[in-house]
Amino acid sequence: MKAFIVEFIGTALLLAVVTGSGIMGDTLGVGNAAVALLGNSIATGAGLYVLITLLGPMSGAHFNPVVSLMFWRLGELKLKKMLGYWFSQFTGAIMGVWLTHVMFGYSIMQESTKSRAGIGIWVSELISTAVLLGVVYIGLKTAKEKIPMLVALTVTAGYWFTSSTFFSNPAVTVARSFTNTFVGISPENIVEFISAEIIGAILVLSIVNLAKNKTD
């Protein structure tokens, strides 16, 4: 139960950072998307570093259903616990968005109208998820103590080198459909985004399994 609560709180705080910094960047940037994205990416990377460093020892600091999926497939997470993590991550992510609306004096219940569609964005999201999971997997093997920094820097860079701005997280995707702000995504685009994220996860897991079989 402790791990589930930590995943809930961690994911909620992550979305509060993502959403709040997006609102703040967009407001202070006075419509300058580059300034908004800069503030959004730096704040998200910094927030991730702190959250993973502090909460990692308690739950693993997944904050992401595909990360939990990878650990389950690797035999490091039981199915029941993975499902509990998923529940905590999705509900925590949505709660984090709603909490941010309260902090900024916005209407709590919103629906994004921001379209994020097209083959380029979907391929981008597939690659984003594969890159993130690859960094986590290789990092745990070669530089475990540096995982917080590796993930934080990967996400920060991902905001800028991908057209989808590196969602790479089904819980984040769903939660961001509940905010009609800079970081929002239209509910109509959720299925494509999550499908791309799942395919990216399957791609990485297939490569990992192939490598294991060759080693065996």
Image (spheres, rainbow, N blue to C red):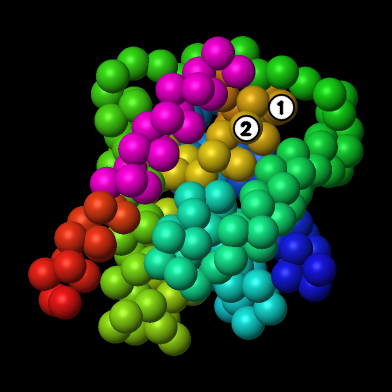
Numbered label tally? 2
SS at circle 1 = loop
Q: Nearer the viewer, residue 39 or 44?
A: 44
Residue 193 falls in which quadrant of the image? top left
Work out which quarter of the rendered image holds the C terminus and state it.
bottom left
For the residue marked with disc 2, what is the amino acid? Val
Image mark for residue 174: 2
- The structure residue drawn at horizontal position 49% and vertical position 62%, both measured from the top left corner, is 72
Is 211 placed left or right of 130 in the picture?
Answer: left
Is 206 placed left or right of 27 in the picture?
Answer: left
Is 127 placed left or right of 98 in the picture?
Answer: left
Q: Main secondary structure of the magenta part?
A: helix
* Residue at the spot of label 1: 178
Magenta region = 187-203
Residue 51 appears in the rendering: yes
- The structure residue drawn at horizontal position 40% and vertical position 67%, both measured from the top left corner, is 74
- The structure residue drawn at horizontal position 61% and vertical position 42%, both measured from the top left corner, is 171
Q: Is residue 29 above or below residue 41?
A: above
Residue 14 within the magenta-colored segment of the rendering: no
Residue 189 within the magenta-colored segment of the rendering: yes
For the residue marked with disc 1, what is the amino acid? Phe
Labelled pair 1, 2 in contact (Cβ < 8 Å): yes
SS at circle 2 = helix
**For mark 1, does the 10 Å Cα neighbourhood hold few (<14), some (14 to 19), or many (20 or more) residues?**
many
Q: Is residue 181 above or below residue 135?
A: above
Work out which quarter of the rendered image holds the N terminus and state it.
bottom right
**Residue 212: x percent and y percent?**
21, 70
